[in-house]
Image (spheres, helix red, strand yellow):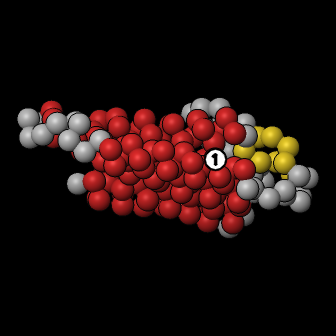
């Protein structure tokens, strides 16, 4: 079940981002989609880039969403992230490099889905939440570390 939900999450992200970018590339004007959390921009080189607070909150948003409703909210959260990334890019708010921050988000979604599968098994009296909690925790830490590394090695942008 976890594998299907992560595939649905990836498909939701790609579909919403691709559709938004395709519509704006055809010349239509779509409004910029606001995120549900602070996703501020800061000066970086000669351009703008996502702030560290925005990166952390985006990571936490998808982490919590992957745990909600036994993982069924993960595709919806990633669809909203796809809209956010595509609208920010098409309105020239962020550099294409900032799309790399979705990789740690997918890691967080997968970790959340693993934990929510254990919670669902515990709810159905088939197992316990703590059966395999070490691997999802390791994934959360690895995803957070990757997000921090991506933030720190971001090249200066030239407008």
Q: Quadrant of the N terminus?
A: bottom left
Answer left or right for 12 relative to 44: left
Residue 122 x %, y %:
15, 35
Total labels drawn: 1
Look at the picture and state if 137 lies above or below 97.
above
Dot 1: what SS?
A: helix
Is residue 46 in view? Answer: yes
The image position of residue 150, as x and y in percent, is: 66, 54
Relative placement, left or right, of 101 versus 65 is: right
Residue 19 occupies quadrant: bottom right
The one of 109 and 134 positioned closer to us in this rendering? 134
Would you name the residue on which mark 1 appears? 148
Quadrant of the rendered image containing residue 121:
top left
Q: What residue do we see at 8% from left, 35% from top?
A: 125
Is the C terminus in the top left, top right, bottom left or bottom right quadrant?
bottom right
Callout 1: 10 Å neighbours few (<14), some, many (20+)?
some
Residue 91 visible (yes or no): no
Q: Position of residue 103 (x, y in %)?
A: 54, 57
Q: Residue furthest left?
A: 125
Foreground residue among 62 and 126? 126
Instruction: Please indicate whether residue 136 sits to the left or right of residue 157 in the image.
Output: left
Q: Residue at x 50, y 61 (%)?
A: 14
Q: Which residue is depicted at the point 73% across and 40% down?
A: 51
Q: Which residue lies at the image location 62% right of the left edge and 58% below the top edge?
A: 100
Nearer-the-camera pick, 42 or 89: 42
């Amino acid at each position: 079940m976890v594998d299907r939900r992560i595939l649905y999450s990836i498909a939701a992200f790609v579909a919403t981002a691709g559709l938004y970018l395709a519509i704006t590339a055809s010349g239509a004007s779509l409004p910029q989609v606001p995120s549900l959390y602070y996703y501020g921009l800061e000066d970086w080189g000669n351009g703008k880039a996502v702030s560290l607070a925005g990166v952390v909150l985006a990571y936490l948003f998808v982490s919590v969403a992957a745990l909600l409703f036994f993982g069924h909210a993960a595709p919806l959260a990633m669809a909203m992230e796809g809209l956010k990334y595509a609208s920010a890019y098409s309105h020239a708010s962020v550099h294409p490099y900032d799309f790399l921050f979705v990789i740690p988000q997918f890691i967080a979604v997968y970790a959340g889905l693993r934990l929510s599968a254990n919670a669902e098994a515990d709810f159905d009296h088939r197992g316990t939440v703590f059966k395999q909690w070490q691997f999802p925790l390791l994934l959360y830490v690895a995803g957070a570390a990757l997000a921090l590394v991506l933030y720190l090695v971001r090249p200066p942008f030239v407008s």
